[in-house]
Image: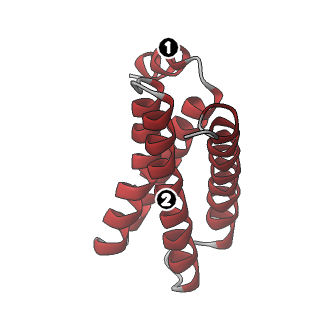
Amino acid sequence: MSLELKSNKTENKSIIADKAYDFALQIISVYKELKKENEFELSKQILRSGTSIGANVNEAISAVSKKDFVHKLSISLKEARETKYWLHLLRDSGYINQKTFNKSNKDCEELIKILSSIILTTKQRYLSNS
């Protein structure tokens, strides 16, 4: 299975897609740990938003226009911000430890910065007259 994952990552040929994919795997690990602690509601929320980032990035890669590209990445950005919220809530409620929070939050912040930058640059270059 890990060979499939690695080949899937290299097919993307996109730094943001690879980072979002790695982050999704990290969130799946958090989800599994939360399920072991019998936490089912918050775990589903963070799983949904944390894995949705990469799914929308991949949709953006196949966008039919620059406007569609920005729209899909904007959804990814919203999902990343939502995931950040869930991470803070899970840490502050004691469901995840500081080490797990620090790693996940750092990676989530990086995704937010990259997505924001791509969206802004694309809007400035291609959609400024629209």
In the current view of this chain or complex, which residue is farthest to the front? 129
The dot on residue 78 is 2
The quadrant of the image that shows the C terminus is top right
Question: CA–CA distance between discs 1 and 2?
Answer: 25 Å
Residue 54 pos. (x, y %): 46, 40
The dot on residue 89 is none
The quadrant in which residue 125 appears is top right
The answer to whether mark 1 and mark 2 are in CB contact below 8 A is no
- Identity of the residue drawn at 31% across and 63% down: 44
| Residue 6 position (above or below residue 35) | above
The quadrant of the image that shows the N terminus is top left
| Residue 54 position (above or below residue 29) | above
| Residue 111 position (above or below residue 2) | below
- Callout 1 amino acid: Glu
Question: In the image, is 26 to the left or to the right of 40?
Answer: right
In the current view of this chain or complex, which residue is farthest to the bottom? 93
Residue 109 pos. (x, y %): 68, 57
- Identity of the residue drawn at 51% across and 19% down: 12
Q: Residues within 10 Å of mark 1 (few under 14, many from 20)?
A: few
| Residue 51 position (above or below residue 105) | above
Closer to the camera in the image, 67 or 14: 67
Query: Could you tell me if residue 39 is visible in this image?
Result: no
Closer to the camera in the image, 28 or 48: 48
What residue did someone put label 1 on?
11
- Identity of the residue drawn at 59% across and 37% down: 127
Residue 67 pos. (x, y %): 47, 36
- Label 1, secondary structure: give it: helix
- Callout 2 amino acid: Lys
Residue 38 pos. (x, y %): 30, 73
